[in-house]
Image (tube, rainbow, N blue to C red):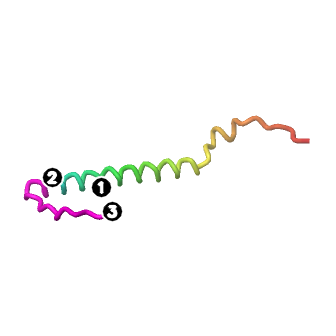
Amino acid sequence: MKNDKPPMVLTEAEYVEMMREFESAGRWMSEQLELKRNLASTAQTPDICSVSNTPQHDRS
């Protein structure tokens, strides 16, 4: 896709706002990745209580 319009120059206020939004988005993405890592690590950790309370089935 070709863009025939010349690039627009941002005002200082527009640039500052864009950078604030960029930093905010970066923080949000970092928080989401941290949550995902925490969920993944808790999913891999066996729950000792649930394992010990699981009824044993005879598979004979």
Residue 1: image tag: 3
Examine the structure image and report whether residue 3 is included in the region drawn in magenta.
yes
Q: CA distance from mark 2 to mark 1?
A: 14 Å
Query: Which label's residue is closer to the chain start, 2 or 1?
Result: 2
Closer mark to the observer between disc 2 and disc 3: 3
**Contact between labelled residues 1 and 2, with CB atoms less than 8 Å apart:** no
SS of the residue at dot 2? helix
Q: Where is residue 11, by image quadrant? A: bottom left
* Residue 23 horizontal/vertical position (percent): 24, 55
Residue under label 2, please give it: 17
Magenta span has 55? no
Q: Secondary structure at mark 1?
A: helix
Tell me the distance, in whole angstroms, between the alpha carbons under discs 2 and 3.
Answer: 28 Å
What is the spatial separation of the Cα atoms under label 1 and label 3, in whole angstroms? Answer: 28 Å
Q: Position of residue 13 (x, y in %)?
A: 8, 54
Q: Which residue position holds label 1?
A: 26
Q: Nearer the viewer, residue 17 or 2?
A: 2
Extent of the magenta region: 1-17
Q: Which badge, 2 or 3, comes first in the chain's sequence?
A: 3
Q: Position of residue 52 (x, y in %)?
A: 69, 39
Left/right placement of residue 50 relative to residue 30 reads right
User: In the drawing, does residue 37 fall left or right of residue 14?
Assistant: right
